[in-house]
Image: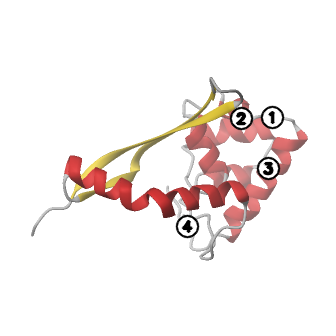
């Protein structure tokens, strides 16, 4: 039976245990994801407390990280989502995403509405991918794909 969390504390504590186990075993998120049948982005988000894992995936992750039965069960609960505090993020990487939305959020909104009409891009029917590509000018570039279903508003 599906269970739901009413506070973030339990999932945050589980995230701490997961990250300690990940470091102790020197595993990447891709290695932890192996055998789950799910994407690396989804499993990573789940391990950071933002999604429940299906039973089979939770068991695979639990075995990989040597989690106890309670932790495996907790991985399957529906979390209270939202990983950011209400203040402006101070972590430089997270802040840059915040900055991108501050600078380009209204542009994205205008372009989405011009192309699709009045509606939203789903964060539920959604896919995320992060790729590292070489920059022809030297160094690396991050290519981040946000792929969400468009959901139009309907008059009633």
Q: Which mark is residue 27?
A: 1
The reply to whether discs 3 and 4 touch (Cβ–Cβ < 8 Å) is: no
Say which label, 1 or 2, has the lower sequence index: 1
Residue at 87 percent of width and 37 percent of height: 25
Which image quarter: residue 86? bottom right
Q: Which sits in the foreground, 7 or 101?
A: 101
Q: Position of residue 106 (x, y in %)?
A: 38, 61
How packed is label 4: few (under 14 Cα within 10 Å), some, or many (20 or more)? some
In the rendered structure, the answer to whether residue 24 lies left or right of residue 112 reads right
Q: Position of residue 88 (x, y in %)?
A: 63, 72
At mark 2, the secondary structure is helix
Say which label, 1 or 4, has the lower sequence index: 1
**In whole angstroms, how far apart are the C-alphas of marks 1 and 3?**
10 Å
**In whole angstroms, how far apart are the C-alphas of marks 4 and 2?**
23 Å
Q: Which mark is residue 32?
A: 2
Q: Residue furthest front?
A: 137
Q: Which sits in the foreground, 127 or 14?
A: 127
Say which label, 4 or 2, has the lower sequence index: 2
**In whole angstroms, how far apart are the C-alphas of marks 3 and 2?**
11 Å
In the rendered structure, the answer to whether residue 153 lies left or right of residue 4 reads left
């Amino acid at each position: 039976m599906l269970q739901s969390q009413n506070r973030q504390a339990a999932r945050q504590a589980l995230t701490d245990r997961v990250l300690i186990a990940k470091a102790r075993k020197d595993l990447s998120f891709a290695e932890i994801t192996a055998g789950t049948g799910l994407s690396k982005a989804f499993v990573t988000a789940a391990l950071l407390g933002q999604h429940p894992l299906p039973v089979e995936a939770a068991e695979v992750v639990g075995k990989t990280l040597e989690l106890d039965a309670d932790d495996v069960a907790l991985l399957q609960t529906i979390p209270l989502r939202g990983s950011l505090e209400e203040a402006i993020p101070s972590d430089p990487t997270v802040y840059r995403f915040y900055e991108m939305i501050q600078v380009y959020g209204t542009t994205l909104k205008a372009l989405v509405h011009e192309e699709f009409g009045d509606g939203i891009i789903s964060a539920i029917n959604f896919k995320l991918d992060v790729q590292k590509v070489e920059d022809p000018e030297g160094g690396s570039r991050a290519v981040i794909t946000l792929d969400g279903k468009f959901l139009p508003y309907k008059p009633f």
